[in-house]
């Protein structure tokens, strides 16, 4: 077992909508526990609405949980406020599902990548530009395109720019929230391979959220299966895909052709 980077236990979140007699409660996450080791990819898989993205946002403190604990490198994530919370976010970054809505259409590609440095007051303008060009090149975008705005890029190119932005602060953990689901199938493999290459180079850890079992199988070391806000099963990739224990996991695998009977 490697170094435990992220350890979350008993997370719960209920959202309330409507008013008065029409108030409705949705239990998005119920008693969810998840751990990510250093250098590991932990896949969190489930159908749409199962609570995967809410779990990821709780861990980034973009959503406040109703219950549970979470530590990052042994530090209490849920107790952090103000400057301490901002400092922690340098080490935990997010890659969004929709590469088009996750960027400011007025920003140029180089400015998108450099935005985290501006927020955290790092480097001068020239140094930001130089570093942004290096990151663009690393993710497969020609730095000569750095002055172009998002409308000039394809979805796959924009997701590469989003990955470069997530790398800017040299994080330990990146939460990937359905990072290839909005992309053409032909592009998905390229982005997954880029993420795996970057992980090998930089020692990154990923919490990889997805509904596509084939994608999760390709990239994950450990997999947790989520249903209706609860994690029903966790294990190594081989355990989940070759020897699933929970009936929901077996049904999910059978429905998508990823189960042991298919190979």
Image (cartoon, rainbow, N blue to C red):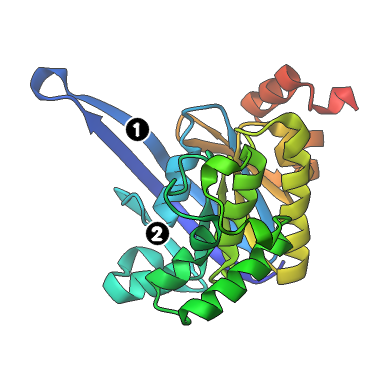
Determine the image quadrant of residue 142.
Answer: bottom right
**Circle 2 residues within 10 Å: few <14, some 14–19, many ≥20:** some
Residue at 68 percent of width and 54 percent of height: 41
Residue at 46 percent of width and 40 percent of height: 101
Q: Report the front residue among 76 and 62.
A: 62
Residue corresponding to mark 1: 27
State left or right for residue 62 relative to residue 196.
Answer: left
Q: Where residue 242 sits in the image (x, y, percent)?
A: 82, 35
Q: Is residue 70 visible?
A: yes
Residue corresponding to mark 2: 69
The disc, 1 or 2, on the residue closer to the chain's N-terminal end is 1
Q: Secondary structure at mark 2?
A: strand
State left or right for residue 248 relative to residue 30.
Answer: right
**Quadrant of the drawing holding the C terminus:** top right
Residue at 31 percent of width and 75 percent of height: 83
Q: Is residue 38 visible?
A: no
């Amino acid at each position: 077992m490697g170094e435990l980077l992220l350890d979350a236990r008993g997370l719960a979140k209920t959202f309330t909508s409507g008013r008065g007699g029409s108030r409705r409660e949705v239990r998005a996450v119920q008693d969810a526990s998840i751990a990510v080791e250093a250098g590991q990819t932990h896949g969190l898989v489930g159908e749409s609405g199962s609570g995967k993205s809410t779990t990821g946002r709780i861990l980034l403190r973009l959503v406040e949980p109703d219950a549970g604990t979470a530590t990052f490198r042994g530090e209490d994530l849920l107790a952090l406020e103000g400057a301490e919370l901002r400092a922690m976010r340098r080490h935990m970054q997010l890659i969004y599902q929709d590469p088009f809505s996750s960027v400011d259409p007025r920003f140029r590609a180089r400015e998108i990548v450099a935005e985290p440095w501006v927020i955290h007051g790092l480097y001068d303008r020239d140094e930001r530009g130089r570093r942004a060009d290096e990151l663009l090149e690393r993710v497969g975008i020609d730095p000569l395109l750095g002055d172009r705005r998002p409308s000039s890029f394809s979805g796959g190119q924009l997701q590469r720019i989003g990955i470069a932005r997530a790398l800017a602060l040299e994080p330990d953990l990146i939460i990937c929230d359905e990072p290839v689901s909005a992309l053409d199938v032909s592009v998905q493999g390229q982005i997954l391979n880029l993420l795996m290459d970057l992980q090998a180079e930089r020692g990154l850890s990923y919490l990889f959220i997805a509904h596509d079992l084939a994608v999760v199988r390709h990239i994950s070391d450990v997999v947790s299966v989520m249903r209706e806000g609860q994690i029903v099963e966790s294990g190594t990739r081989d355990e989940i895909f070759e020897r699933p224990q929970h009936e929901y996991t077996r049904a999910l695998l059978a429905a998508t052709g990823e189960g042991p009977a298919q190979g």
